[in-house]
Image: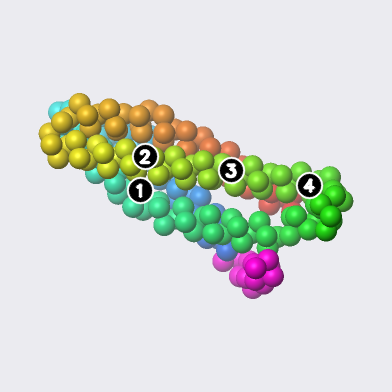
């Protein structure tokens, strides 16, 4: 499997890096646009039920847009992590460190992977909350819908924005270190 990933990366390096960066941009940029542009526009609507309905709809569209990019990001991350040979540069066949700088970069890859996985889990939780909110909205239970949506906008999206920016920074660090 490792040889397949090496070969895949060697043959399609530019396309894989492009897809990875583009996926991060769409995912993190989409959340930033939603939180700092769409959210404020929605808040200008006159009634609370309409605000909740529009927020639920906007979140549904955002999640539909970013979900395929999340999958692409994770797949390209795995291909790059193996294909760039960070492990081979950091440790020998027995797992002993052979280069401290390479080991540091190899560890950063794992940190970055953990960040993207936390963000993915958080995204899954946001999707579930948005779907629960929609069920409440369908029953005209605006209080229930608000309790589901409020957490998304107040904590979950901002958390993913912060983590995404950190992951992008680590990606730049890794690229410069390579």
Where is residue 17 drawn, in percent x and y?
59, 60
Q: Earlier in the sequence, mark 1 or mark 4?
A: 1
Q: Badges 2 and 3: C-beta atoms under 8 Å apart?
A: no
- Disc 1 marks which residue? 63
Q: Residue at x 27, y 42 (%)?
A: 131
Q: Quadrant of the N terminus?
A: bottom right
Circle 1 packing at 10 Å, graded few (<14), some (14-19), many (20+), is many
Where is residue 155 drawn, in percent x and y?
41, 29
Judge from the rendering whether residue 53 lies leftward or rightward of residue 170; answer left or right. left
Query: Nearest the camera: 166 or 128?
Result: 128
> What separation in Å lies between label 2 and label 3 (alpha carbons)?
18 Å
Q: Nearer the viewer, mark 1 or mark 3?
A: 3
Query: Nearest the camera: 115 or 66?
Result: 115
Inspect the magenta stretch and tell me whether residue 135 lies in it: no
Q: Residue at x 40, y 51 (%)?
A: 66
Q: Earlier in the sequence, mark 2 or mark 3?
A: 3
Q: Earlier in the sequence, mark 3 or mark 4?
A: 4
Circle 4 packing at 10 Å, graded few (<14), some (14-19), many (20+), is some
- Disc 2 marks which residue? 126
Q: Which residues are magenta?
A: 1-15
Query: Nearest the camera: 97 or 172?
Result: 97
> What separation in Å lies between label 2 and label 1 (alpha carbons)?
9 Å
Q: Badges 1 and 3: C-beta atoms under 8 Å apart?
A: no
Image mark for residue 103: 4
Q: Badges 1 and 4: C-beta atoms under 8 Å apart?
A: no
């Amino acid at each position: 499997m490792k040889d397949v990933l090496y070969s895949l990366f060697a043959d399609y390096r530019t396309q894989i890096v492009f897809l990875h960066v583009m996926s991060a941009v769409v995912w993190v940029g989409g959340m930033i646009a939603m939180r700092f542009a769409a959210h404020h526009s929605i808040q200008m609507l006159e009634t609370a039920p309409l605000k909740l309905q529009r927020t639920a709809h906007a979140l549904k569209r955002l999640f539909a847009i970013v979900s395929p990019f999340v999958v692409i990001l994770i797949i390209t991350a795995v291909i790059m992590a193996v294909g760039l040979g960070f492990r081979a540069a950091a440790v020998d066949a027995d797992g002993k460190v052979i280069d401290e700088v390479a080991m540091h970069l190899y560890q950063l890859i794992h940190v970055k992977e953990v960040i993207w996985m936390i963000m993915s889990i958080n995204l899954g939780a946001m999707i579930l909350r948005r779907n629960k909110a929609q069920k409440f909205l369908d029953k005209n239970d605006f209080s229930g819908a608000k309790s589901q949506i409020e957490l998304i906008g107040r904590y979950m999206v901002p958390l993913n924005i912060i983590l995404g920016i950190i992951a992008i920074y680590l990606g730049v660090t890794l690229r410069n270190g390579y």
